[in-house]
Image (cartoon, rainbow, N blue to C red):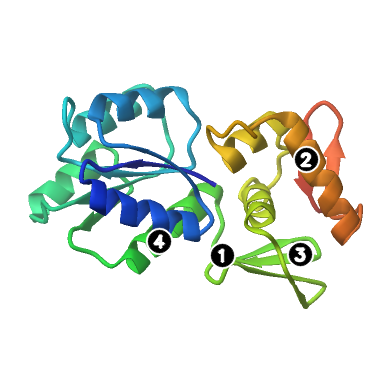
Amino acid sequence: MRALLVEDDPDVGADIAGALGAAGFVVDATEDGVDAWYRGDVEDYDVAVLDLGLPRLDGLSVLRRWRAAGRAFPVLIVSARGDWTEKVEGIETGADDYLAKPFELGELIARVRALTRRAAGLATPLLACGRLVLDTRRMSASLDGRPVRLSPLEFRFFDYLAHQPGRSVPAGELADHLYGTSEAADTNAIEALVMRLRRKFGADLIETRRGFGYFLGAAPA
């Protein structure tokens, strides 16, 4: 899952980025409002964590521009402005949740995960992917009821596919959401990852719909 972090305090931003990374997110970070608006407008994110007090363009203006452009990814506002009127304005502008500073990183991660689940229509942190079950709270997995070990990249792969129920996901989209802006983000890397996972867990777990992409379990209609 790919997250955009917009926070102008370098120390706070580093803490949030570290927590998101440990929770399985690929994080793109910026401290600038104009850059945040541009990234959210041209890149495909699963969630954004957005501060309000930003240089050049404030957070609410960034959010307004995203929503006006039809960018529908969930947004969690984090701000030192804890007054209820600020919260109402944030939600009415298009935010999905609001977290006042200071906050516990564990709560932020729980809220971010909840937003991505809701956006995908998923109800619980346990994601069933055919024979595979992911526990997004513990970053663990089981296959046929037995624990299996996944690398962080492997977990992100299954996690992203599990958040796309009923659709085939192209290799290019997977690369964007697994690697972000990394140089490794290409379709060849995804194909190699899929081959490795099929050898590890069996060819039936990850299926291919030719011309459309990869999916877990039964073929989508």
Residue 194 image offset from top left, x and y in percent: 81, 45
Relative horizontal placement of residue 192, taking residue 177 as reference (left or right): right
Give whichever of 119, 188 is nearer the camera. 188
As measured in the structure, the alpha-carbon distance from the residue carrying label 2 to the one carrying label 3 is 15 Å
Relative horizontal placement of residue 120, taking residue 213 as reference (left or right): left
* Dot 3 or dot 4, earlier in sequence: 4
Q: Is residue 63 above or below residue 144?
A: above
**Which residue lies at the image location 24% right of the left edge and 29% below the top edge?**
33
Residue 1 image offset from top left, x and y in percent: 54, 47
Q: Is residue 133 above or below residue 167?
A: below
Relative horizontal placement of residue 199, taking residue 52 as reference (left or right): right
Image quadrant occupied by the C terminus: top right
Q: Which residue is mark 4?
A: 109
Give whichever of 125, 186 is nearer the camera. 186
Local secondary structure at mark 1: loop
Dot 4 amino acid type? Ile
Q: Which residue is mark 3?
A: 132
As measured in the structure, the alpha-carbon distance from the residue carrying label 3 to the one carrying label 4 is 23 Å
Dot 1 amino acid type? Thr
As measured in the structure, the alpha-carbon distance from the residue carrying label 3 to the one carrying label 1 is 13 Å
Residue 187 image offset from top left, x and y in percent: 73, 30
Residue 218 in sight here: no
Dot 3 amino acid type? Leu
As measured in the structure, the alpha-carbon distance from the residue carrying label 1 to the one carrying label 2 is 21 Å
Identify the image quadrant of residue 62: top left
* Dot 2 or dot 4, earlier in sequence: 4
As measured in the structure, the alpha-carbon distance from the residue carrying label 2 to the one carrying label 4 is 27 Å
The label shown at residue 214 is: 2
Q: Is residue 82 above or below residue 62?
A: below
Residue 41 image offset from top left, x and y in percent: 40, 24
Relative horizontal placement of residue 54, taking residue 194 as reference (left or right): left
